[in-house]
Image: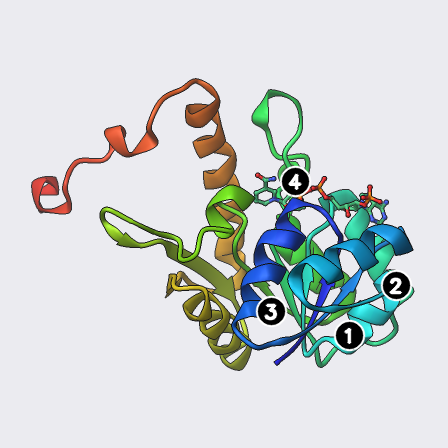
């Protein structure tokens, strides 16, 4: 698959590196030509501008701060046929969502672009995504995906499998709001040095 990576930071490197190793054709786009070329060199991809990467990809990873995404995509033309993979976390002070009470990050991007947005890869760190593979004692890492387009979900599920992860379609894009909020909640545990899994009993213990 042709994948455009928007951004040259940690998420871009972790996910772009995995997909390049899996044989996908990657174009890294950054606002700094040097940083885009350097990342492309490290992962075995081509480099270009943000606009070029957005136009190149059948799928486009938004590895940018959430509040920059719409400005960056604004210059990229019609994205109606693109799969936008939204890994952004719109989290501000107090670990609260900066998107407030309205639609969440992914839904705002979908509404503004008309693209097929899939929320994915936002719930853990680049350190995890760069593991080869992201498999732990309990097995492959589950990657929750939310989106409204079945083909786009299947394509992103394939990208998660290519990395050695276990994709889980977790519902329509409306549920991306919950995944975004859950991530902010989880980060609170991790910042406090606590393991959020300790609040979850085994499923069999839940009763009826
Ligand atoms: N780090 C995590 O643990 C983590 C986990 C899951 C999801 N995420 C999400 O993934 C996204 C990327 O995070 P990251 O950790 O990769 O961040 P990062 O390492 O700081 O990289 C951010 C990238 O965005 C670019 N950028 C910043 N402002 C821009 C602007 N106005 N226009 C164009 N490009 C701009 C930066 O370019 P320059 O290098 O030129 O500054 C850099 O390439 C964020 O939305 C974040 O919430 C992060």
The residue to which callout 2 is attached is 49
Is residue 52 at least partly visible in the picture?
yes
- Residue 58's label in the rendered image is none
Label 1, on which residue?
79
Label total for image: 4
Q: Which label lies toward us, 1 or 2?
A: 2
Answer yes or no: do the residues labelled 3 and 4 have beta carbons within 8 Å? no
The answer for how far apart the CA atoms under marks 4 and 1 are is: 22 Å
x, y percentage for residue 203? 15, 46
Q: Pick the quarter of the image with the N terminus.
A: bottom right
| Mark 4 and mark 1 residues within 8 Å of each other at the beta carbon | no
Q: Is residue 125 visible?
A: no
Mark 3 lies within 8 Å of ligand 1 (Cβ measured):
no
Task: Report if the beta carbon of the residue with label 4 is closer than 8 angstroms to ligand 1.
Answer: yes
Residue sitting at the far top: 192
Q: Which residue is mark 4?
A: 90
Distance (Cα) linking label 1 and label 2: 16 Å
How packed mark 4 is, by other alpha carbons closer than 10 Å (few <14, some 14-19, many 20 or more), is many
Find residue 204 and report its horizontal and vertical position in percent.
8, 46
- SS state under label 3: helix
Q: From the image, tell me which residue sits under label 3.
A: 20
Give the CA distance from mark 3 to mark 2. Answer: 18 Å
**Residue 63 falls left or right of residue 178:** right
Q: CA distance from mark 3 to mark 1?
A: 23 Å
- Which comes sooner in the sequence, label 2 or label 4? 2
Question: Which residue appears at 74% of the width and 55% of the height?
Answer: 39
User: x, y percentage for residue 133?
Assistant: 40, 57
């Amino acid at each position: 698959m042709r994948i455009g990576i928007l951004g040259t930071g940690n998420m871009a490197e972790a996910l772009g590196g995995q997909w390049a190793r899996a044989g996908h054709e990657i174009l890294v786009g950054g606002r700094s030509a040097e940083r885009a070329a350097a990342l492309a060199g490290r992962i075995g991809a081509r480099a270009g501008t943000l606009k070029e990467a957005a136009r190149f990809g059948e799928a486009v990873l938004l590895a940018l701060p959430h509040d920059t995404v719409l400005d960056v995509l604004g210059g990229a033309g019609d994205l109606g046929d693109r799969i936008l993979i939204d890994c952004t976390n719109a989290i501000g002070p107090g670990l609260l969502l900066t998107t407030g009470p309205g639609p969440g990050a992914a839904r705002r991007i979908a509404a503004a672009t008309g693209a097929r947005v899939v929320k994915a890869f936002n719930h853990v760190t680049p350190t995890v995504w760069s593991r080869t593979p992201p498999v732990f004692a309990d097995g492959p890492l589950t990657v929750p995906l939310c989106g409204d387009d079945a083909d786009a979900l299947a394509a992103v599920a394939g990208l998660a499998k290519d990395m050695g992860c276990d994709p889980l379609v977790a519902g329509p894009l409306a549920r991306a709001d919950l995944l975004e909020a859950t991530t902010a909640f989880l980060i609170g545990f991790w910042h406090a040095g606590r393991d959020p899994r300790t609040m979850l009993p085994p499923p069999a213990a839940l009763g009826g």
